[in-house]
Amino acid sequence: MSDATRLRVGFIGLGRMGQAMAARILGASHDLVVFNRSEGKATELVKNGALLSSTVKGAVEGREIVITMVSDDYALRDVALGPGGIRESLAPGDIHLAMGTHSVAEIQKLAAAHAEAKQILVAAPVLGRPDAAASGQVSIVAGGPSQAVKKCDPLFSVMGKRTFQCGDKAEHASITKLANN
């Protein structure tokens, strides 16, 4: 992979799905920094070349795309908008790629908060289970500004078998995922 196509990625949330997705990104030779509240979940990723951060801020700074794969709206709000969170630490113009399943209202609030900070939110929940994520076979439902979604395409292509672009607003992805759940 050339340096021009190698992305600097932060990954927050290393449950079973997050670990599988992060491993796919690392396997594609992207520059990866990971964070999880319980450190032990990053052991294999670090052994394979990921850098471990002890804070959300450390997983965000210097990254052009930061992925979250967290369990619920509360966890997303905490890592994104809490002290030392993504919004405080992400540079203007960079992307927060929320890949968990979250409510439409939470994604709308988060998109507005990022827009105020001149950052971009792309919501891209996945359809599939951890074994499908480990083999790059999940489907991804992406919503957000088309240029930002396009910048995420190299990540989508290693994490999933198909990406459905469903509109220029992040909440379009949540609406689509929740309607089909």
Image (cartoon, rainbow, N blue to C red):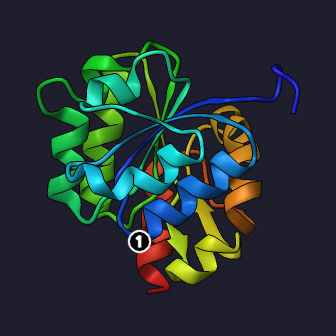
Image-quadrant location for residue 70: bottom left
The residue closer to the viewer here, 73 or 33, is 33
Q: Residue furthest bottom?
A: 181
Residue ID at (59%, 45%): 168
Q: Residue furthest front?
A: 47
Relative placement, left or right, of 99 versus 115 is right
Relative placement, left or right, of 82 versus 132 is left
Where residue 3 appears, x then y in whole percent?
81, 20
Looking at the image, residue 123 lies above or below residue 56: below
Where residue 112 appears, x then y in whole percent?
31, 33
Helix, strand or loop at label 1? It is helix
The residue closer to the viewer here, 157 or 134, is 134
The residue closer to the viewer here, 134 or 66, is 134
Where residue 40 appears, x then y in whole percent?
29, 55
Q: Amino acid at mark 1?
A: Arg
Q: Which residue is mark 1?
A: 16
Where residue 86 appears, x then y in whole percent?
30, 29
At label 1, counting other C-alpha atoms closer than 10 Å, the crowd grade (few under 14, some 14-19, many 20 or more) is some
Looking at the image, residue 123 lies above or below residue 129: above
Residue ID at (11%, 26%): 83
Relative placement, left or right, of 20 versus 55 is right
Quadrant containing the C terminus is bottom left
Quadrant containing the N terminus is top right
Image-quadrant location for residue 41: bottom left
Q: How many marks?
A: 1
Relative placement, left or right, of 9 versus 112 is right
Residue ID at (70%, 32%): 147
Residue ID at (43%, 22%): 119
Looking at the image, residue 134 lies above or below residue 80: below
